[in-house]
Image (cartoon, rainbow, N blue to C red):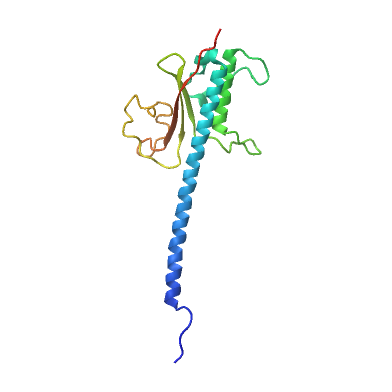
Amino acid sequence: MTQARGFTLVEVLITVFVMGVGLLALAGLQIIAKKASFDAAQRTLAGQATQDILTRMRANASVANRYLVTNAIALSAPGTDCAQASCTPDELAAWDLHEWAEQLAVGGEVDDEGVATGGLSAPTACIIAGNTAGHYRIAIAWRGITPLAPPDDADDATDPANVDCGRDAYLDDEGLEDFRRVMVSDVFVASAVS
């Protein structure tokens, strides 16, 4: 009697099935990783933009209140280009806000035709005055790639995430703000010494 050698058709089919399930799981994991990477990149851009405008405000502290804005992205270009000419502190504040809005929208990356390829997804940027002198709240909102449940305490006015910056701008089909992401920073800008 001769002994059979090699694989049978059933063994081959089972192996193909197990490998197929494993490859599908790997593809699903890759999709989740790409979405998480995108969200992380968006948070990084928001953090860099927050640090940028804070540095600009501190460098021009004598007119820090000129930086208050409900949506920096909607501002028109200032009349004076402070990169080419000397500016007053007020003109510099307007120029800084314009540059900040450009950074948020473009992220510093443009293709050969000048089209933005980086930046936050549909950003909204706000700077509001705090409760005491020199305190400000910088909030940057953008549209996330995946829906997340809104926080349970969204009605709490003391919650740092409960800011109006970008509110109702990123609604899903049910009217919920599941796609709204917001980074809020409470900062201090010391008054300039005269």
Measured as percent of width and height from the top left, residue 173 is found at 37, 39
Q: Residue at x 63, y 17 (%)?
A: 80
Q: Looking at the rendering, which quadrant does residue 90 occupy?
A: top right
Measured as percent of width and height from the top left, residue 129 is found at 44, 17
In the rendered image of this protein, does residue 114 appear above or below residue 69? Answer: below
* Farthest residue, direction top: 194
User: Across the whole image, how many numbered discs are drawn on residues?
Assistant: 0
Q: Residue at x 51, y 24 (%)?
A: 72
In the rendered image of this protein, does residue 99 appear above or below residue 190? Answer: below
Q: Residue at x 45, y 64 (%)?
A: 20
Q: Is residue 110 visible?
A: yes
* Farthest residue, direction right: 84
Measured as percent of width and height from the top left, residue 123 is found at 49, 31
Give the quarter of the figure containing the N terminus: bottom left
In the rendered image of this protein, does residue 74 appear above or below residue 117? Answer: above
Q: Is residue 121 visible?
A: no
- The foreground one among 163 and 74 is 163
* Farthest residue, direction bottom: 1
- The foreground one among 2 and 12 is 2
Give the quarter of the figure containing the C terminus: top right
Measured as percent of width and height from the top left, residue 31 is found at 47, 50
